[in-house]
Amino acid sequence: MAQHNVSKEFRGSTFRTETERTAWTNKRQEQALEPELPIVDPHHHAWDKDLGRYLIHELAEDVYSGHNVVATVFIECGSMFRADGPAAMKPVGEVEFVNGIAAMSASGKYGKAKLCAGIIGHADLTLGDGARPVLEALIAAGNGRFRGIRHGVTWDSGNAAKFGRRQPPRHQVLDPVFRKGFAHLKPLGLSFESWQFHPQLDDAADLLRAFPESNVILNHCGGLLGIAPHENRDEVFKVWRENMRNLVQFPNLTVKVGGLGMTYCGWDFHLRDIPPSSEELAAAWRPYVETCIELFGPNRCMMESNFPVDKESTGYGVLWNALKRITQNCSPAEKAALYRDTAARVYRLAV
């Protein structure tokens, strides 16, 4: 589909099924760069829904595409919630489901990588103190693999609002009841995935200031937007960079560097007949990746795939090539931190 035939309103998605996205991304094949570099992929999903499956077979096919992925971390995506029982406890089903994938991987029948070695689930923190029994149930369901929760708070005045599964209020993390729920994470040894859009990063700073000892992981370079009303990429970059700089002061925060293949970032890669090369992706993503590393340092950054969501723009192997191109001048110690060590430390993985 040529870009000039696509309306601005439609450019947010090509509505491909998982099978169609795989066929499209397979049109671009590259040999893995630095194939021996160990990778802990700290952000991927798994699901079986209307647009297709991304379960252990699909995950393993991507993981073994030439790069040395030694372990992965599953991040909640609203998959396999329980159909029955109390609403607050329905997300426990997702952790039960993913723990099954991890158990399958632990058998060794799906290769040497420890798939879903860490699990991030969802608990509704607006339950306040009522979130505690949910968190305890999630820990039990994780069978030693559960590490924390994500309660997405993505809000935007423009087109990005329709991308979220939930429709939270603008300043969700400032709500006192939400913070009552949040306060139960650290005593239980759990982390928090901070997922918001880049104009909301001041709220993330306020939350970090209130909970300076909680383990917080910023998702997707802070939630970069590039669609209406955020089309001015130069202006967006300035705002984003300043908001990110304001977060450096919080040592309990680490940053996931990736998630830049999502359509709301504003690229046109998903509209092409042939997926972009890793050189093209590296050129587009470099300012954001390099800024994250410059601000936070390799020991507070971890490279992520965000698969299969970033499959909207590229294949798994090409994605890692793009990130490796951007970091090619980093030292071996810096690369070790960016691709394995930071994630292993933050998620307490033995790799």
Image: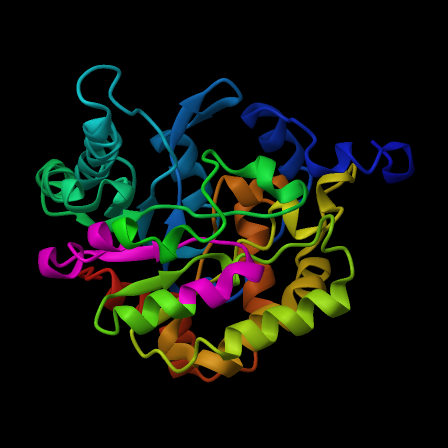
Name the quadrant containing residue 212: bottom left
Residue at point 33%, 69% (across, down): 208
Q: Among all residues in the image, which is located at the extreme front?
A: 176
Q: Quadrant of the C terminus?
A: bottom left
> Which residue range is magenta in the image?
179-204
Residue at point 48%, 54% (across, down): 196
What colour scheme governs how the chains and residues are painted in the rendered image of this protein?
rainbow
Query: What percent of the width, then of the height, locates residue 13?
Result: 68, 34
- Viewer can see residue 72: yes
- Viewer can see residue 326: no
Name the quadrant containing residue 103: top left
Residue at point 58%, 61% (across, down): 199
Q: Magenta includes 87?
A: no
Name the quadrant containing residue 273: top right
Query: What percent of the width, then of the height, locates residue 339?
Result: 40, 67
Left or right, 215 with respect to 306, comes to left
In the image, residue 124 sits, relative to residue 258, either above or below, namely above
In the image, residue 82 sits, relative to residue 43, either above or below, namely above
Left or right, 243 with respect to 181, comes to right
Of residues 289 and 320, the one nearer the viewer is 289
Number of labels in the image equals 0
Q: Quadrant of the N terminus?
A: top right
Query: What percent of the width, then of the height, locates residue 299?
Result: 36, 78
Q: Among all residues in the image, which is located at the extreme top?
A: 84
Of residues 181 and 233, the one nearer the viewer is 181
Q: Magenta includes 196?
A: yes
Left or right, 64 with respect to 99, comes to right
Query: What percent of the width, then of the height, locates residue 132?
Result: 12, 44
